Image: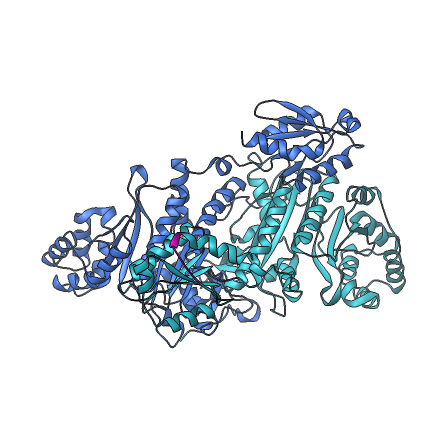
Chain colours: A blue, B cyan
Amino acid sequence: MASANPARGMRDFLPADVRKRNYVIGIIKEVYESYGFEPLETPAVENLETLMGKYGDEGNQLVFKILKRGEKLDLAKAATESDLADLALRYDLTVPLARVVANNRNHLPKFFKRYQIQPVWRADRPARGRFREFFQCDVDAIGSSSLTVEAEIISAACRILQRLGFDDHSVRINHRELLRSIVADAGIDNETDALVSLDKLDKIGPDGVKKEMLERGISAASADQFLSAVSGTTSNSDLDAVLTFCDGLPVSVDPSLARGLSYYTGTIMEIVLTDGDFKGSIGGGGRYDGLIGMFGKEQIPACGFSLGLERILVVMDERGMFPPEIADSTPADVMVTNWSEESVADSLKLANELRSQGLRVTLYPEPDKLGKQFKYADSIKVPFVCVLGDDERASETVKLKNMATGEESVLPADAIGKSVRGQLTE
Amino acid sequence: MASANPARGMRDFLPADVRKRNYVIGIIKEVYESYGFEPLETPAVENLETLMGKYGDEGNQLVFKILKRGEKLDLAKAATESDLADLALRYDLTVPLARVVANNRNHLPKFFKRYQIQPVWRADRPARGRFREFFQCDVDAIGSSSLTVEAEIISAACRILQRLGFDDHSVRINHRELLRSIVADAGIDNETDALVSLDKLDKIGPDGVKKEMLERGISAASADQFLSAVSGTTSNSDLDAVLTFCDGLPVSVDPSLARGLSYYTGTIMEIVLTDGDFKGSIGGGGRYDGLIGMFGKEQIPACGFSLGLERILVVMDERGMFPPEIADSTPADVMVTNWSEESVADSLKLANELRSQGLRVTLYPEPDKLGKQFKYADSIKVPFVCVLGDDERASETVKLKNMATGEESVLPADAIGKSVRGQLTE
């Protein structure tokens, strides 16, 4: 018999999980839309050539590749992976965005502001909090090099976290040009090596970063000068403007902020939680004026930000931040009992009548002992049960039981919706 | 340069597409939840062995298989596809459901009612209206063999179509036991051959079905008797009960309804549109009391239904059924202009002020000629523009222009939300 587990690093989301995910995603969407960002969705499957070469050597290894099919798959002649695979699973949301912009330049507005909330897949070694399928929540503004773009993206991200109930988020910003000149001043040739090392500062500390820089062949003197410079103060006119535009938001310049991705060209930014056991990055982004052109003829300025949905969900769970209607969600407001073969049709009608009153209603599917039906209602935590037995049918009423208080009332069917809503908001 | 097209048979959904899809999906969710169905999501990627052998030989060929990675991929020793692939893309939502039920039997209610709206992938030859990535909208009730389950599923599907604005949907039902006895009475040995042929009746007519039956080795006499029986009338106690429970809904028994899938055991059902150019099936399902056990020790009764989202979207588009706020959707309610470097910060503040009044607001990102800004506002079809120039800043007002009527009014910022909402609902 086949295993019933999901594949390694993949997760099933049971109803309670889906409700929490959808609650957070709903707020993200609502806030991004309030800033004029529009929804975009791209296919899970991309041509392999669309993804190859975009994520570095390590990234290439982590892309899930899809086997060719039918005659295209010639096992006898296959010598390399690219003889075997022609498609691949989406690895991030930025490369598909660049492809869509190139492919639809004439159908998209001059300033294209899109959000995209979809899963991506990476063949990483699964670990605590690291999955092979996970959602990215990206927002990008294409077509303007104005720093209002950075400010609006930071404002939107802060607004999302505030709406979700966070009060310890703060935004750190820096600028790739500043880092570049610090790297050059320190006499370091390989900027990427220096920034990839610096990006680990939060995790491994300055000594760890220095050790890694030495391993990458950077001299001790250069590493010291570099680390000293990034622990000082820094600024430039771009960062000054972003700070001015973000007046009132928790934004500050951090000269040691690196962001690993090599494609950033200007402002870089990261949003972190600062309190308790769950501090650390929950999103980041920056300006990348050279990336969108990779599928088209034009270079188009762009700036984007990605919120870490999986991380946000973990922290909200640990901190108990979900509102009660999400944390204690139930499959229905009311369960209608099922008394006898003769009364089934009446129970079905009652369920539909209550739905037309705006209630979420589940029907106990078959005639059964009333005790078992109540036990089931308890197990699914439904707050109300409507009993429709012979007495109630004879008197054209329904017995409504509040499962939390035990209170029972006998009402005509058309009064149930109002009574349930009244008791729920008490 | 890499191609900017999506992979063959895959689609990008631009904002207008996503809004239409989300509108329909939102109504489907809302109605299913009002019937007590709960959301479930499963990963796109399943173990290959989870999917193999579940969809017949043809299905096996259409499953997208994922190349093994790293050391697991031994090209020199690979002799068959299964040496190369260990994972696969979800092919339907029913096999993952069976796996989840087996894996979580103790965490799920005795009667598990779930809906699942996610994409599936099939390596079919792409054609008009047939894609390699498409959404399925499945609803299934696990754990009861009561016919109230069929009735509630039919009721929910009809309610969804009614809510979407359809008025020509009707439900055809039949029963596998009835078909089985017709097949046996006609002296046909291979039930599957007969039902797969019959399933094409709508497309190829009775002569076509007969021809196919003859090709499958069924005698002319048997085929004639079979076709005569399925064009007659039929009923049994299950169908009678479903008809009674569905009182008031457009449900009728169709003795020729076959449904191709071999796993149905009882009631089968299909929902069709009957009017105009777009008649035909837009969903179907049935009872399958022998399938859920494939990953576990117990057999558990089940009944499910799948709505054809892609087909519904095509028909709604062709019939112009989307409400204006979806059909003519805009990225924002209001665009705020950007006058000069000096006024940028004020424009940003105004945009945030309007958002806090509940409006969706986009900011023109950079100072520009007002004419160009209005042209852009026109191009994105935003219904209102707020001009914040030197005069307005001096008088602490905003000029609000209704782009449809051309009407302009000068207001304090805190009066804009009310004015926009008033003009939008006029």
In depth, the one of A380 and B276 nearer the eye is B276
Residue A193 is a magenta residue? no
Location of residue B151 in the rendering, given as x and y in whole percent from the top left corner? 74, 43
Q: Is residue B330 left or right of residue B242?
A: left
Q: Residue furthest left?
A: A221
Q: Quadrant of residue A113?
A: bottom left
Location of residue B252 in the rendering, given as x and y in whole percent from the top left corner? 81, 51
Q: Residue at x 17, y 49 (%)?
A: A206
Q: Is residue B162 left or right of residue A307?
A: right
Q: Quadrant of residue A36?
A: bottom left
Residue B410 is a magenta residue? yes
In depth, the one of A155 and B225 nearer the eye is A155
Give, as a single range, the part of the protein colored magenta.
B409-414
Residue B32 visible in this rendered orientation of the protein: yes
Residue A380 visible in this rendered orientation of the protein: no
Location of residue A406 in the rendering, given as x and y in whole percent from the top left corner? 60, 22
Q: Is residue A3 left or right of residue B164?
A: left
Location of residue B136 in the rendering, given as x and y in whole percent from the top left corner? 61, 55
Q: Quadrant of the N terminus of chain A?
A: top right
In the displayed structure, A368 sits above or below B212; it is above
